[in-house]
Amino acid sequence: MSKMLRVPVVISFFIFGLFSLGFTEETLTITTYYPSPYGIYRELRSQRMAVGDTYINRSTACWDPPCGGGTDISDATTGGNIDLIVEGSVGIGTVTPSHKLQISDIDTAASRAGLSVVQSGAITGTGYGGYFTKTGASTTNVGLYASATDATNNYGLIVENGNVGIGTTNPSFGLDLVPGFSGDGVRLQTPGANSAVFRIDNPAGTVSSLFGVALSPNMLLAGTVANDLVIRSDNGNFLFGSAIIGEFMRITNTGNVGIGTTNPQGYQLYVNGNQYINGTLTIPVPGAIGGDIAEYIEALDSEAADVVIIDTGNNQGVQRSTRAYDYRVAGVISGRPAFLIGNKSENSKPLALAGQVKCKVTTEGGAIKRGDLLVTSSKAGYAMRGDVDKIKPGMLIGKALEPLEKGEGKIAVLITGS
């Protein structure tokens, strides 16, 4: 059968060659029948080939000018090496291609690729192993679509070497993202409640760092090793935790920070545990005259700047002073302490222990000058200048830092105690 195939072909080319000496255009027509009377053609070779109705006639399209008014598709004109032109669709492994080029491969050999492209030429300038462009006024344009399904491990895209640039043709990092559109630059969405949206691992050891956004608190424990650091969001709160101790810090959606607690209780910083400060702790108090140290104490009828005495009718409580030179004086209620200790309750108030504080005063004992010693007065909650001859241990409130010539008011007082 092989000889029967080759003889007619050789003769055809021989005869075709003789007749071609007197013609400028050469045509070879091969007609096959089904079933083929000679079996299967073993080889068909051509230097260049064009397939499609547009390329049937040389006067319509040709490789070598003159073309008689047709399209010149020669190498010199196009700047490329066009050896094959297909007007319709090409199907490889399929007889019904639905795209310009459709490859259908069901081979099960290991490491089998449906399409493999290798460009190894030493190109001057930029060399591309693959180049995809989608233009046109479509509803949606997709330059490259990749999908992997139905396997144990599915990887839609793997970049083995080199930097990846999105929105840039000159990436300087492993992933260089320069959005060329309005809106968010990156969106990461978790496929499940216990999946990390973004994760960084250290494959060389057992310690890894896991960063993610979860839909449930289980993300603080699920899928992590003992030393993992987990960061996640929960109803607008920003949580930090690990697989060993769970959550250890959070930033609430109101901007408060809790360390060792899940409820900062309305404080900008709430720490549940011991603290150690090796250095200077500076606590500025905007709008205050200074910074006093205060402690919560039960005070039913008192307000800021009131002078208070020990409440003899209730344990661990104070009340407004009502008589002059009272040895039961406890101090002044602070309006804005810099440092506040103790447990807050419904009726507790901050009692200034040291530092500068605003205090209600009266000139009942005479005009007040800077440096005067202050004691309780007969006016409820007010201090006055004390007579040094009458002041006994336990009566002193503090020293005046501001003067008051006459009447009543509030002045800055340095809490010293007696």
Image (cartoon, rainbow, N blue to C red):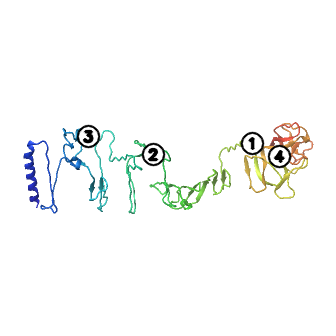
Of circles 1 and 3, the one toward us is 3
In this rendering, does residue 4 appear at all? yes
In this rendering, does residue 273 appear at all? no
Q: Crowding near pointer 1: few (<14 within 10 Å), some, many (20+)?
A: some
Q: Which mark is residue 346?
A: none
> Relative to 209, is 71 above or below?
above
Residue type at mark 2: give it: Leu
Q: Nearer the viewer, residue 85 or 60?
A: 60
Of circles 2 and 4, the one toward us is 2
Q: Which residue is mark 1?
A: 288
Q: Crowding near pointer 4: few (<14 within 10 Å), some, many (20+)?
A: some
Q: Earlier in the sequence, mark 3 or mark 4?
A: 3
Q: Which residue is mark 3?
A: 78
Mark 2 → mark 1, Cα distance in angstroms: 48 Å
Mark 2 → mark 4, Cα distance in angstroms: 65 Å
Q: Secondary structure at mark 1?
A: loop
Mark 2 → mark 3, Cα distance in angstroms: 35 Å
Q: Position of residue 45 (x, y in %)?
A: 16, 51
Q: Earlier in the sequence, mark 2 or mark 3?
A: 3
Q: Which residue is mark 4?
A: 417
Mark 1 → mark 3, Cα distance in angstroms: 81 Å
Q: Earlier in the sequence, mark 1 or mark 3?
A: 3
> Mark 4 and mark 1 in contact (Cβ < 8 Å)?
no
Quadrant of res 414: top right
Of circles 1 and 4, the one toward us is 1
Residue at left offset 68%, top offset 55%: 265
Residue at left offset 82%, top offset 40%: 411
Of circles 2 and 3, the one toward us is 3
Q: Nearer the viewer, residue 90 or 345?
A: 90
Residue type at mark 4: give it: Gly
Q: Earlier in the sequence, mark 2 or mark 4?
A: 2
